[in-house]
Amino acid sequence: MRPALTFSQLYNFCDSSLFSFRSTEELETLEQPIGQERALNAVDFATNIAQDGYNLFAMGPSGSGKHSGIMSFLEKKALNETVPSDWCYVNNFKDPRKPIALMLSSGHAQKFKEDITELIELLKEILPAAFEANAYNNEREAIAQKYLEQQTNIFERLQDEAQKYDVAMNASSLSRVTFVPVVDGKRLSAEEFKAIQGPQKEEIKRKLSEFELIVKDRLRKISELSKAEQKEFKALAKRTTQDAVTSLIDELRQTYTGNEKVIAYLDALENDVVENVRDFLTKPDEMAAMPFMHEFYTPSFARYRVNLFISHESNNSAPVIYEDNPMHQNLIGKIEHVAQVGMLVTDFSMIKPGALHKANGGYLVLDVRKLLMQPFAYEELKRVLRSKEIRIESLTQQYSFINTITLEPEPIPLSVKVVLIGERILYCLLYQYDPDFQELFKVNADFEDEIPRNDENIQLYAKMIGTITKKHVLSPLTPEAVARVIEQSSREVSHSSKFSTHLGTLSDLLKEADYWSKKENLSLIDKEHINKVLQTRKERLNRIQLKIYEQIDEKTIMINLSGDAVGQINALSYISLGGYSFGMPSRITARTRIGKGEIIDIERKVELSGPIHSKGVMILSSYLGSTYAQEMPLSLSASLVFEQSYSLIDGDSASSTELYALLSSLSNLPIKQNIAVTGSVNQFGEIQAIGGVNEKIEGFFDVCMKSDSNASYGVLIPHANIKHLMLKEEVVEAVKAGKFSIYGVKNINEGIEILTGVNASEVNEKVVARLTEYSNTAKEFYKSKNKK
């Protein structure tokens, strides 16, 4: 019979004497999470390879330190990289609906904006002064005088022509002329003209018609002179404006020489100022004096603004951007609108950058779960990465949700490394079902859940604890507290020779321990504070567990903890509710009789069994037939059931338990009821490892201690689970005192000996004898039935 485990196999204590510090305050700060060398090497590879599609997916459970580790790595790497260019959006004077994107060297966008603003302000002062100067006024007056003389000369000649045609001419202006007939030196009135009859009237009409043609010709010449005058005025204004503007803009051209798009914009700006110089000639004080003029004309200088889109003036490294809310417009930017006269309008100054613009030339980090939950965001990200340019388009425009005036900003070239952070299941689903994902995210960084618990890693773990306490301004830990945290970390991964790399869980533990430490007005966190955290957590979450134990204690749930019984055994179940896990015993019973080799799983029959549990029961039938009935038919009908089970059961961790109950029923040998069992079995009778071994053992232990703390109890577990044992102190002490025994078994024979106290060969003989008896009885039955 295999001996019980010693107490040293039940818990891997961490010796605090391994630490030479008095508190974690003395330890150096770690820059990267421990045990993630492989993942960080993948990050380094993805961020250094200059090829398309080599973006990164960092995967691991939430709280494993992926985000903080990657951000720390990228920020450190970005310090040695070039700061990317600045970007501005400016007005497109030819087509305002298509603003122009200007790229400027890093830190120069703000200066460019200030230069343009200063230029416009100077023009507001210089241009009015230029148009008020004597030189301009004299030249304008000379032009006006020249055309006035020509128009006067035409009018005088027209007066002479009027006398020839016996016409008197009246002129309120050179462009408005009226005339009446003259007879014998007297102007005729309308009544007098009507009174004239005969040839005289016809002669007057002829002269009036001929003179009217002469007047129209002269007025046409006067109109042409007016147009020519206005052209000269415009030419003068343009020449005057250019003389004032060109020298100022030439200074800017000299400043931004080499940037062709900026030079082209300055040329376009100069032409627009010249064409719209009237805006600069209306002084603000004059507009204030004539408020009614606002209804007819308001100078607008908004078109000369510079939209400072992306500026790296205050940066000294490549950008590392984390977008917490990766919705569509937060990724690619947006175009804002304002309401005017019942309409939504916009202009280039309302173009706002997205996370991709801010990260351009650097790194963009996104939570893949949040990204996938935002409509259209993931598809837009893929489109941008494929096209290598950021095109700002609103969803309302793409899908015609709202008809409104909008813009088509010039796309900005994209050069960025995107890092997606998420769980492994999301990576697998995207890789399987999205072909684009495989092309765009070719590098995978898989963060470890656990690392070996060796001396080197123990020291690193202590430094990580110190790093977290400093980051969150927590009290430092004593060596004993650090040792207790390491033990708990091993418990969390259910492995005595490993511990967890889950920084979120570690951080929460330290924060709660800091609370209890400060509540006692202590400056250090000690072992007792760690234990206090674990105890209070359990008390907050174990209400359901205590209710179940209470029902067992009251015999509502029937569990035998003493004596022995045939075909009845205590199995160990694992329950997880809302982040709290615990174990509890469950009674399994088996009944056998003559049949056709069928093992009936009652849970499966009533659809309360999951597929893995059903698989385990089928393995039992295979094991029984191959082990005990190789040379005869398995004339057996058996039924198995979890007593008082009213919900779905899944998992194969009870398959060995069910097999023990069947062997007990077949051999008619009773099983000790003070021993509970867990472990799955294969077709060769080998006991396989299961999960939740610590919780299962502790759950049975608690039930036993509530029943009779002076009796002795035990648990059978798979031998492969011994390395997973990190049991609570009460269990270890009970093992030391001989009140509780834990057995690690490798096969069914070892287990049945412990449960029955009978040698396995004797048990097997009894099973074979019973199955032979069933087989013979079945043969006789069918023979007699056939004779009839």
Image (spheres, helix red, strand yellow):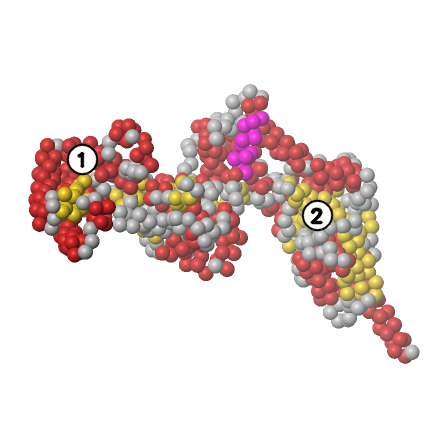
Quarter occupied by residue 75: top left
Q: Nearer the viewer, residue 456 or 109?
A: 109
Mark 1 Cα shell of 10 Å, populated few (<14), some (14-19), many (≥20): many
Quarter occupied by residue 554: top right
Q: Nearer the viewer, residue 388 or 647?
A: 388
Q: Residue at x 24, y 31 (%)?
A: 283
* Residue 220 in picture, x, y percent from top left: 16, 51
Q: Which residue is mark 2?
A: 573
Return the disc, 2 or 1, that comes first in the chain's sequence: 1
Residue 541 located within the stretch drawn in magenta: no
* Residue 113 in picture, x, y percent from top left: 26, 38
Residue segment shown in magenta: 505-516
Q: Which residue is mark 1?
A: 127
* Element class at badge 1: helix
* Element class at badge 2: strand
Mark 2 Cα shell of 10 Å, populated few (<14), some (14-19), many (≥20): many
- Is 38 rendered above or below residue 134? below
Q: Residue at x 24, y 46 (%)?
A: 191
At label 2, the amino acid type is Ser
Q: Residue at x 15, y 34 (%)?
A: 130
